[in-house]
Amino acid sequence: MINTNYIVFIDDTSEVISLAEKLFSEESNYHFVHSSSEKEEIKKALMTMPDLIIINADNIDNNIFKVCEYIRKDKENNITPIIVTADTKDEEFRMEILKSSVEYYIPKPLHEGFFYYTIKNLSRLIASNRCISALTGLPGNVQIESELKRRIASRKTYAVLYFDLDNFKSYNDKYGFMNGDEVIKFTSSVMQEVIQQYGKNGDFLGHIGGDDFVAVLDYENAKKIGKEIIKKFDEKISDFYIEEDIKNGGIRIANRRGKIEKFPIMTITVAMISNRYRKYNSPLEIGEDGASVKKKAKTMEGSTFLENRRKTPMAH
């Protein structure tokens, strides 16, 4: 499933997470992380860059207000929504909870439907507020950076695919931005289809902007996914051209100097890097290597897949 919702449960028992796992048993795009209330355990859980944090105040050994304060001091998670649940009718306690930068308080006993839809609707709201592309519906740069940080922290082998359309600007110049938008949406749908077919739970696809996309995938399937996306893109891209341009193998328009120039039918460049060959410490390092590989790949003719296997940083 593409673009997983990560939810951290802070609870010294398994009471609340067990209920959530039961309620979301048929929804594979939710990943639950269980943490005790010990600071080191919370710190480890927060490295997943959660979309939502749920605290069972009744079943933690540490003070609930100190736990909330600790979470809010974490730079990467100080705006992550928190839900606190507890079995108390003390109105003063509830007010103090909300004053501790907690967004939602849910009283016990937990009503299954209310608990389920609160998590689901809040996750949807978070997604819609995190710079999702209006054109493709895919996560934007905020979530892309969070996903890269999550992968770096996981210490598991992953791959990052950078996608870029070749000759897209010349297409826009002739066919107009509305047709260009249709090409962007087509490209997005191809990527989503292929990742759904060949990917794994937790795979991520984001829209950087314009004709640039990025996928963060399990290393094992990344190469197959990249090459399959190229195949499906090449099979259908001619549908967006008039017959004359297809016969001519491209379009003829004036370049920036005013001279008529031929631009080939659009192709797609896929640049792949991974931590299998080089350890990355930040999204910036990943982006720099990705840009270098993509730059090299774009010098090749036709749709291209290029993987960086260098163990040292690429020259920029």
Image (tube, helix red, strand yellow):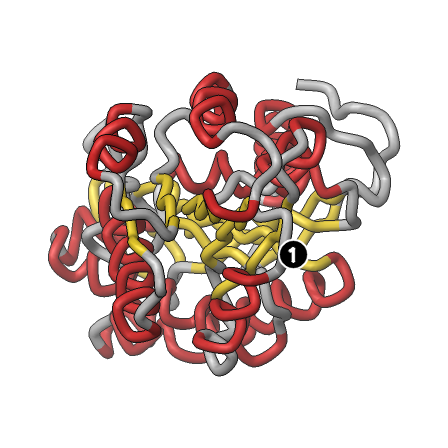
Can residue 166 be spotted in the picture?
no
> Which residue in the protein does label 1 denote?
305
Which of 232/18 is in front? 18
State the image coordinates of residue 262 (x, y, percent, origin top left): 34, 51
Which of 125/174 is in front? 125
Residue shown at 85% from the left, 40% from the top: 277
Residue shown at 37% from the left, 44% from the top: 84
Can residue 177 be spotted in the picture?
yes
Relative to 6, is 248 on the left or the right?
left
Q: Quadrant of the C terminus?
A: top right
115 shown above or below 101: below
99 shown above or below 252: above
Q: Amino acid at mark 1?
A: Phe
Q: Secondary structure at mark 1?
A: strand
Relative to 298, is 249 on the left or the right?
left
State the image coordinates of residue 200 (x, y, percent, origin top left): 63, 70
State the image coordinates of residue 300 (x, y, percent, origin top left): 62, 48
State the image coordinates of residue 26 (x, y, percent, origin top left): 48, 82
Residue shown at 56% from the left, 58% from the top: 32
